[in-house]
């Protein structure tokens, strides 16, 4: 895994686009954007540059597709 990217496994859902949102543990939205053209991919590769002003720590990543929401707690190391 490239240290400048995060890899997040995509849940098994029939979707080609996801709304990706990152929250801190207090529930504050850090970053949100849409990723598309994801047909038959099993993971998302997210550049750390999409998370400006973040420090190393635990975050919640939320993936939304087809009105279904999947949330996962992840540790991000920015060092």
Image: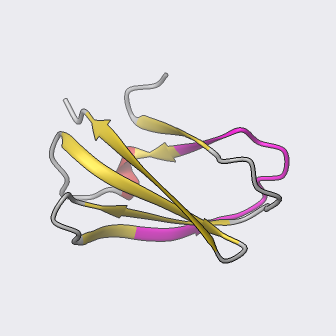
Image point (46%, 25%), residue name: 2
Question: x, y (%) of residue 47?
Answer: 45, 46
Way the structure is coloured? secondary structure
Picture quarter with the C terminus: top left
Image point (23%, 69%), residue name: 27
Picture quadrant where residue 31 is located: bottom left
Q: Does the stretch in magenta take in 42?
A: yes
Q: Which residues are magenta?
A: 32-45
Farthest residue, direction top: 1
Image point (26%, 58%), residue name: 52
Question: x, y (%) of residue 55?
Answer: 15, 46
Question: x, y (%) of residue 35?
Answer: 63, 62
Picture quadrant where residue 22 is located: bottom left
Left or right: 21, with 24 as reference point: right
Image point (15%, 65%), residue name: 26
Picture quadrant where residue 77 is located: top left
Q: Does the stretch in magenta take in 40?
A: yes
Question: x, y (%) of residue 29?
Answer: 29, 72
Most foreground residue, 15 or 69: 69
Left or right: 65, with 3 as reference point: right
| Vertical side of 19 occupied by 43: above or below | above
Figure disc tally: 0
Most foreground residue, 66 or 17: 66
């Amino acid at each position: 895994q490239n240290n400048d990217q995060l890899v997040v496994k995509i849940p098994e859902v029939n979707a080609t686009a996801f709304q990706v949102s990152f929250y801190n543990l207090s529930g504050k939205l850090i970053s949100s954007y849409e990723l598309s053209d994801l047909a038959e991919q099993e993971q998302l590769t997210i550049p750390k540059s999409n998370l400006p002003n973040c420090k190393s720590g635990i975050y919640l990543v939320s993936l939304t597709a087809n009105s279904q929401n999947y949330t996962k707690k992840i540790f991000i190391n920015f060092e």
